[in-house]
Image (spheres, helix red, strand yellow):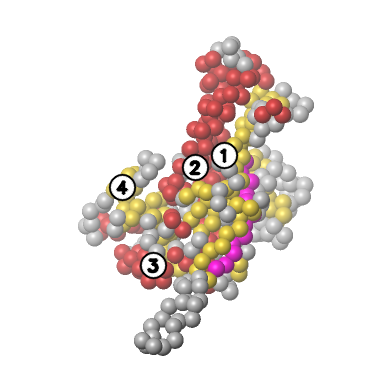
């Protein structure tokens, strides 16, 4: 007979493995190539000694001359707090009891909840991969008065219906007090307007922005932080450590020459090999147009995870919905690692239970968690082409 114990067992033994695999390999092709490891995790932090440059203990000399002075590798310490990644499902007691008499109905109930969790988690992990850790989804381009439920934003790429968001002040990067979390009801992607479930309770200043609820400055350190030319990365100043800044190529018109130049620069500077090109959809269309105009054959490649994509010189060219418009990243996936305390797990309570009753309500919830963050060991071994329009 199906009961609450059966639900607990199914979540632990059936769904957890499937969901963890999908979140590790099914978010996007680049995430699927990144190694996940528990190394260099110390308590709540990632502390990693990373070499840069070359060993200095080499040289040429005379037959009887003085040998080269020993000068070992250069190291810097990367320090990063583990980010707390959560996903929750909620099932009402009524719905659970209504399905307990039918195993098929109960399975359908759990399937629906897990599919919803998986879809939302994939969306947010894919989005975080291109973020800078701040959690910023989009910026508000103008002052917005109180009592409005619809307002304009700069970019709707990171927004979709159902998301629960906070409004954050750019002045102090703190959630605007009294605003409360807002549920997105509709997104007009042509007009770039968003409709939420309740009126704004205070004035908004141009430059304020939206984040997923509770996520301001709590998301993983994605490509936005790695490819920024300013500030700090992993606790080190980019202005002092120039090797922390990837090369940026600006080209309004995409050409094979500028693509090869970006790849060659990486090889010349670091000896690294680009094994994936990740770009926006419009940049991929520009590349397809370019191949067509040059009458080049379009080669295809099937990647791990079932992804099929076009290639450039044997390198997969993958478009991603969250990549900034007009952008093409040249990446070496071997330089990236997702350091984690553990893989995806259910938060367990007393007696190992994963389903917990919500206080004062006839509902149960289960929370999926992973403590992790992304580190690129060699930022200078990556490159980006930006500003592509033609």
Q: Is residue 19 above or below residue 261?
A: above
Q: Is residue 150 left or right of residue 35?
A: right
- Could you tell me how far apart the alpha carbons at marks 1 and 3 are, in whole angstroms? 35 Å
Badge 2 marks a residue whose secondary structure is helix
Q: Residue at x 50, y 53 (%)?
A: 337
Disc 4 + disc 2, Cβ < 8 Å: no
- Could you tell me how far apart the alpha carbons at marks 1 and 2 are, in whole angstroms? 9 Å
Badge 4 marks a residue whose secondary structure is strand
Disc 1 + disc 2, Cβ < 8 Å: yes
Badge 1 marks a residue whose secondary structure is loop
Give the class, few, some or many, for how many residues have Cα within 10 Å of label 2's Cα (few <14, many ≥20): some
Q: Residue at x 61, y 24 (%)?
A: 8
Q: Which residue is mark 1?
A: 344
Q: Which residue is mark 2?
A: 24
| Earlier sequence position, callout 4 versus callout 3 | 3
Q: Which residue is mark 3?
A: 271
Disc 2 + disc 3, Cβ < 8 Å: no
133, 149: nearer the viewer: 133
- Magenta part mainly helix, strand or loop? strand
In the image, the segment drawn in magenta is 75-86
């Amino acid at each position: 007979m199906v009961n609450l114990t059966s639900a607990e067992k199914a979540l632990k033994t059936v769904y957890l493995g499937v969901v963890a695999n999908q979140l590790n390999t099914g978010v996007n092709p680049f995430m699927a190539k990144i190694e996940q490891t528990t190394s260099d995790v110390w308590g709540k932090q990632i502390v990693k000694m990373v070499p840069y440059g070359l060993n200095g203990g080499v040289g040429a000399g005379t037959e009887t001359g003085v040998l080269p002075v020993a000068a070992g590798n250069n190291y810097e310490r990367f320090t990063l707090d583990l980010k707390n990644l959560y996903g929750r499902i909620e099932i009402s007691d009524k719905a659970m009891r209504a399905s307990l008499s039918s195993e098929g109905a109960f399975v359908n109930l759990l399937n629906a909840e897990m599919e919803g969790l998986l879809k939302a988690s994939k969306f947010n992990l894919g989005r975080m991969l291109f973020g800078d850790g701040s959690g910023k989804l989009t910026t508000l381009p103008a002052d917005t008065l109180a009592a409005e439920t619809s307002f304009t934003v700069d970019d709707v790429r990171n927004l979709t219906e159902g998301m629960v968001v906070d409004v954050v002040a750019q002045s102090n990067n703190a959630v605007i007090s009294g605003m409360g979390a807002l549920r997105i009801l509709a997104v007009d992607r042509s007009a770039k307007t968003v409709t939420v479930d309740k009126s704004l309770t205070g004035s908004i200043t141009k430059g304020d922005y939206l984040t997923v609820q509770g996520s301001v400055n709590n998301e993983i350190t994605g490509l936005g932080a790695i490819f920024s030319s300013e500030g700090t990365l992993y606790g080190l100043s980019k202005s002092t450590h120039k090797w922390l800044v990837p090369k940026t190529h600006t080209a309004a018109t995409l050409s094979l020459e500028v693509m090869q130049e970006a790849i060659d620069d990486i090889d010349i500077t670091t000896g690294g090999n680009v094994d994936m090109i990740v770009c926006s959809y419009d940049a991929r269309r520009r590349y397809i147009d370019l191949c067509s105009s040059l009458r080049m054959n379009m080669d295809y490649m099937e990647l791990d995870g079932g992804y099929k994509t076009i290639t450039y010189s044997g390198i997969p060219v993958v478009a991603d919905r969250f990549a900034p418009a007009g952008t093409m990243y040249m990446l070496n996936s071997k330089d990236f690692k997702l350091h984690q305390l553990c893989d995806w797990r259910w938060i367990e309570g007393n007696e190992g239970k994963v389903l917990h009753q919500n206080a004062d309500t006839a509902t149960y919830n289960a929370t999926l968690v992973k403590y992790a963050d992304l580190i690129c060991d060699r930022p200078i071994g990556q490159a980006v082409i930006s500003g592509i329009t033609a």
